[in-house]
Image (cartoon, grey):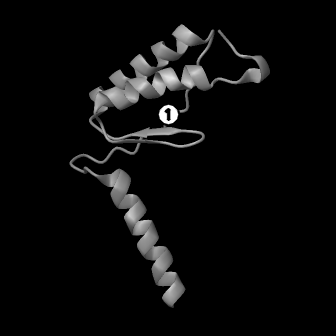
Amino acid sequence: MSQPGGHVHNAVAAAVEVVRASGLPHRTDAMFTTIEGEWDEVFDIIKRATDAVLEASPRASLVIKADIRPGATGEMEAKLDRLESAVDARRTD
């Protein structure tokens, strides 16, 4: 189950597989996985990903942050685009 040295990458990999199979827009970095979608879809994926972790590990820890904007789509990319535009604008000021 758990790995020497406290590594959890196999358990996290199981969760990431669930997220990737969902078909929803997502991004995984060193610390978090961001998922974009409708409330019920996203929380179903969170539950299934957590269950996948618990199959590979004796415990799961979650940090959930929600940005709820009814009607907004594509914000995962759009937020980054706006940030990069702001950074570029500061360079030219």
Q: Is residue 59 left or right of residue 88?
A: right
In this view, which residue lies farthest toward the left?
71
Tell me if residue 7 comes above or below residue 51 in the rendering.
Answer: below
Q: Is residue 60 left or right of residue 35?
A: right
Tell me if residue 14 comes above or below residue 84 in the rendering.
Answer: above
Residue 18: x and y in percent read 39, 23
In percent of the image, x 78 and y 22: which residue is there?
A: 5
Q: Amino acid at mark 1?
A: Ile
Which is nearer the eye, 31 or 21? 21
In percent of the image, x 30 and y 48: which residue is there?
A: 69
In percent of the image, x 58 and y 21: which residue is there?
A: 10
| Figure label count | 1
Tell me if residue 5 comes above or below residue 56 in the rendering.
Answer: below
Residue 37: x and y in percent read 29, 38
**The N terminus: image quadrant:** top right
Tell me if residue 55 comes above or below residue 6 in the rendering.
Answer: above
Q: Alpha-carbon neighbours of circle 1 within 10 Å: few (<14), some, or many (≥20)?
A: few
Residue 58: x and y in percent read 63, 9
User: Which residue does the numbered mark 1 point to in the structure image?
Assistant: 64
Which is nearer the eye, 51 or 5? 5
Q: Is residue 6 left or right of residue 35?
A: right
Residue 42: x and y in percent read 34, 30
Q: Secondary structure at mark 1?
A: loop
